[in-house]
Amino acid sequence: MVQAQPLEPVPEPAPAPMAEPASAVAALLATAPAVALPAAAASAAEAAATLVINQRPVLRFRASLLGDGPAARAELARSAVAEALARGGAGQVTHSDTGDAVRFEVDGATVFYLVAADLGGARPGAQLAASAQQVQQRLQTAL
């Protein structure tokens, strides 16, 4: 009869050294498939800007319009409101629907446009009319 020899223990492999957290994340990202965010969503999250008149927030611009980003739109709107008030009118705020946007005027002078993409949310187009009314009230109060 053949007698079995005792097995030698198999050495366990040494644990791998821990990678630095940043390099581990970089390695993971390097192997992950590239995912592109829609440009509107990416830029909206990065560059939203608030129109403030007389220390009162009126509107948060989130979208680009005619090549102007949210920050530029906020500055242009602030400047347009200041120019309209400098004409010495009553400071009457009105708004009108232009199809895809709502135009805001102070004493008949256009000061800015509100578009659905400025509103965010799941269905911003459905909220445009109600939001325009709120923006008009905020702007009138700020003046």
Image (tube, rainbow, N blue to C red):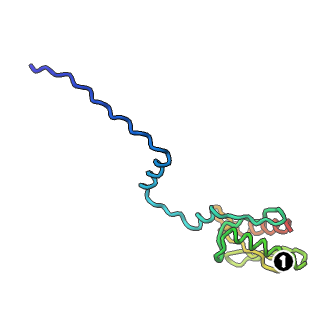
Q: Nearer the viewer, residue 130 or 50?
A: 50
Quarter of image, res 102: bottom right
Q: Nearer the viewer, residue 51 or 117?
A: 51
Quarter of image, res 95: bottom right
Rate crowding at label 1 as few (under 14), some (14 to 19) or many (20 or more) other CA atoms within 10 Å: some
Q: Quick one: quadrant of the C terminus?
A: bottom right
Helix, strand or loop at mark 1: helix
Return the x and y of residue 41 as percentages of the image width and height: 59, 64
Residue at 75% of width from left, 69% of height from top? 132
Return the x and y of residue 11 as percentages of the image width and height: 29, 30
Q: Quick one: quadrant of the N terminus?
A: top left
Residue at 43% of width from left, 58% of height from top? 33
Q: Amino acid at mark 1?
A: Ala
Q: Which residue is mark 1?
A: 84
Residue at 85% of width from left, 68% of height from top? 140
Q: Is residue 25 left or right of residue 52?
A: left
**Number of numbered markers:** 1
Q: Is residue 106 left or right of residue 10?
A: right
Return the x and y of residue 76 as percentages of the image width and height: 74, 74
